[in-house]
């Protein structure tokens, strides 16, 4: 009976205690934690940390703690001046309902948080993680991030913020220097490699501050903020390896900011393999660095959740919530052997990677038969690949021959079409002036016409003879230029005098009474350039002649604008004629193209102008912005001897030409 009573009392006591704990848990006030990540929460490190925090809260049954997650979305250090404004915007969103705890995750979020002056930043409890003991405060917008040398700030030196705890990496410069001197006693120079990230810049300032205490060591900065990977390689090659040691800080992004540096350690190592390297942050460990005293990079989410719970519900004091991630001595056996260092020289409890194992000796009886089988299979595979590749080469050769035959057929068909089109155009263009010449020559033989009428017949015969001669001359010129047989002979020439001669030639030939010829030249009396005067004059006369055909009233203006910055001179022929539609701006440069079939001409003038202009290193085009007629513009080098043939103008030259000529 007594035993049953005791058992009942025990059960009652347990029930009362359980109810007491349940009531206590229920009575807990709901808390809210604001987590601000440096990068997208989907990235591996951030995702793992956040998942561990949530899982640990769930495991502890902390359903009354709400987790709000904000993303600072940091990218390259070049945009670092924007981070503090993004942080300010995030904090301002929670100003009316401040969280009970703020957790900045990552160096960028921590640095941006420390640059804030708002009440929510200064008064709200904060607990950073995934950060180092040293950090930097976000800089002013006007600073040059590639050259600035900010001051390192340590977590125990920060004032004005309610820092209640945190998880920190500590990069111990003194122990790494001690290790360097232990293995390489004659060290006089240390070259530090850091990248174009906030962590890289923080590491650089951290090392610089500590090395000021050691005047006997020269510190050389290989800064990824102002150097690409290839420039760092060049500097490494030029460093004298004697009495020099390399420290590897951080290396993920160089000054280009768009180059993936995940597999470049080996490239940098090969730049100067004689220099021994030590890692401060596990960078290059396993393939480059001999060793180093580095933090143990382990997931921090579970520990961070426990520390947050302990702070929010008062289980621990603030001083006990600061956790420094432990560091260990880590070495690479292969690199130790490469620099002839013995294990006896290493610190105690050091971790050695890439240690040699005698696997072959232990498994010789299994390995040899396996190797024989693999050798047989490898030979069979090589033979199979050989015949497959041979068959593929034959098939590719047949496909190439088929493609070549197809291209040859297409070329032949296009050539035949071009020939047919050329003959058709030529037969029409030649027949027109020849019919006029023959017809009016027959009329001259008759005696039924007055002397004045016969003079008109002679004038018509002369015009059509000139037209026929120009047609044949243009065709021959185009053919010679395209075949490379028309030489360009540059010589010193007064381009203003050449332009005036061209205007006079066209003016006397056309004799337009209601048209004024205008010269828009520089104020200098002479403008000497190197050109082929005959070809340049041919282009200008063609353009002026075209203008005279379509201008019955108004003006024809020739403009010259030299540009000594681009080393080009721009010519423009402007008229008040009928103009050319914008949609036909390129069509008019086609051969035998005439927009008005009733105006005398062969349709070869503008194509010839384009071929001649481009052969002399210039470019010709129709200015579609001019709407009162037609304006043809072309460029020419100021010194044809210094300009490659076939060159043209760039977009800036064209825009400048269109803007200067009016």
Image (tube, grey):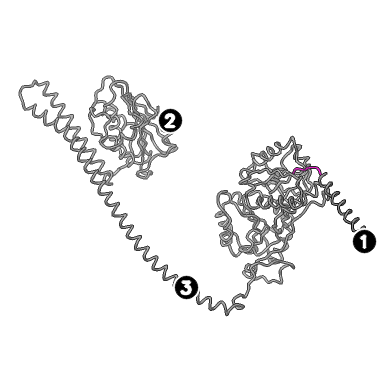
The residues colored magenta run 28-32
| CA gap, disc 1 and disc 2 | 110 Å
Left or right: where does residue 469 sit relative to residue 546?
left
Q: Secondary structure at mark 1?
A: helix
Nearer to us: label 1 or label 2: 1
According to the image, label 1 marks what residue?
A: 3
Task: Confirm whether the magenta stretch covers residue 29.
Answer: yes
Q: Quadrant of the C terminus?
A: top left
On residue 659, which mark appears?
Answer: 2
On residue 377, which mark appears?
Answer: 3
Q: Residue at x 38, y 38 (%)?
A: 638
Q: Predominant secondary structure in magenta?
A: loop
Q: Residue at x 23, y 46 (%)?
A: 416
Q: Quadrant of the N terminus?
A: bottom right
Q: Residue at x 37, y 36 (%)?
A: 635
- First in sequence: mark 3 or mark 1? 1
Evaluate if marks 1 and 2 touch, with contact meaning CB atoms under 8 Å apart.
Answer: no
The percent position of residue 228, horizontal first and vertical second, equals 56, 52
In the depicted view, which residue is nearer to us: 116 or 504?
A: 116
Res 528 → quadrant: top left
- First in sequence: mark 1 or mark 2? 1
Nearer to us: label 3 or label 1: 1
């Amino acid at each position: 009976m007594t035993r049953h009573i005791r058992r009942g009392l025990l059960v009652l006591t347990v029930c009362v205690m359980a109810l007491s704990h349940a009531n206590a848990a229920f009575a807990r006030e709901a808390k809210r934690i604001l987590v601000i990540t440096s990068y997208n929460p989907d990235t591996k490190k951030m995702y793992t940390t956040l998942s561990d925090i949530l899982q640990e809260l769930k495991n502890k049954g902390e359903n009354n703690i709400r987790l709000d997650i904000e993303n600072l979305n940091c990218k390259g250090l070049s945009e670092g001046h924007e981070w503090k404004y993004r942080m300010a915007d995030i904090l301002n969103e929670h100003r009316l309902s401040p969280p009970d705890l703020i957790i900045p995750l990552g160096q960028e979020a921590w640095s941006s948080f420390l640059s804030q002056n708002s009440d929510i930043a200064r008064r709200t409890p904060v607990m950073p993680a995934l950060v180092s003991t040293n950090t930097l405060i976000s800089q002013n917008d006007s600073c040059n991030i590639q050259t600035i040398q900010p001051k390192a700030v340590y977590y125990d030196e920060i004032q004005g913020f309610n820092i209640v705890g945190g998880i920190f990496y500590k990069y111990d410069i003194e122990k790494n220097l001690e290790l360097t001197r232990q293995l390489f006693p004659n060290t006089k120079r240390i070259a530090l490699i850091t990248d174009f990230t906030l962590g890289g810049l923080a590491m650089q300032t951290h090392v610089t501050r500590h090395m000021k205490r050691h005047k006997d060591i020269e510190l050389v900065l290989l800064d990824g903020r102002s150097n690409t990977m290839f420039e760092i390689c060049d500097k490494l090659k030029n460093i004298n390896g004697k009495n020099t040691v390399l420290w590897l800080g951080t290396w993920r992004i160089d000054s280009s900011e768009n180059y993936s540096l995940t597999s470049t350690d080996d490239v940098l190592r090969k730049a100067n393999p004689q220099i021994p390297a030590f890692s401060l942050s596990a960078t290059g460990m396993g393939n480059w660095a001999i060793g180093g005293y580095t933090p143990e990079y382990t997931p921090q989410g579970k520990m961070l959740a426990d520390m947050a719970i302990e702070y929010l519900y008062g289980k621990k004091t603030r001083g006990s919530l600061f956790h420094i991630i432990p560091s260990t001595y880590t070495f690479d056996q292969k690199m130790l052997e490469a620099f002839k260092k013995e294990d006896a020289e290493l610190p105690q409890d050091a971790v050695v990677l890439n240690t040699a194992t005698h696997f072959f000796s232990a498994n010789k009886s299994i390995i040899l038969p396996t190797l024989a089988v693999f050798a047989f299979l490898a030979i069979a595979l090589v033979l199979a690949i050989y015949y497959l590749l041979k068959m593929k080469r034959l098939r590719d050769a047949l496909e190439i021959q088929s493609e070549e035959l197809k291209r040859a057929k297409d070329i032949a068909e296009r050539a035949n079409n071009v020939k047919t089109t050329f003959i058709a155009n030529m037969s029409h263009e030649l027949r027109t002036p020849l019919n006029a010449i023959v017809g009016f020559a027959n009329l001259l033989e008759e005696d039924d016409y007055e002397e004045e009428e016969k003079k008109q017949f002679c004038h018509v015969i002369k015009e059509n003879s000139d037209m026929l001669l120009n047609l044949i001359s243009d065709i021959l010129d185009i053919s010679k230029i395209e075949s490379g047989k028309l030489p360009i002979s540059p010589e010193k020439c007064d381009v203003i005098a050449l332009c005036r001669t061209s205007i006079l030639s066209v003016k006397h030939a056309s004799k337009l009474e209601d048209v004024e010829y205008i010269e828009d030249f520089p104020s200098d009396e002479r403008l000497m350039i190197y050109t082929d005067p005959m070809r340049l004059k041919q282009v200008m006369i063609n353009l002026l002649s075209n203008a005279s055909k379509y201008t019955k009233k108004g003006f024809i203006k020739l403009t010259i604008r030299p540009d000594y910055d681009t080393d080009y001179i721009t010519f423009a022929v402007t008229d008040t004629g009928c103009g050319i539609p914008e949609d036909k701006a390129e069509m008019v440069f086609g051969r035998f193209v005439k927009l008005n079939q009733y105006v005398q001409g062969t349709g070869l003038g503008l194509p010839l102008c384009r071929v001649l202009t481009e052969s002399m290193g210039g470019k010709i085009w129709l200015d579609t912005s001019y709407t009162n007629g037609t304006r043809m513009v072309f460029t020419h080098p100021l010194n044809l001897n210094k300009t490659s043939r076939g060159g043209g103008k760039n977009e800036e030259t064209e825009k400048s030409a269109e803007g200067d000529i009016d």
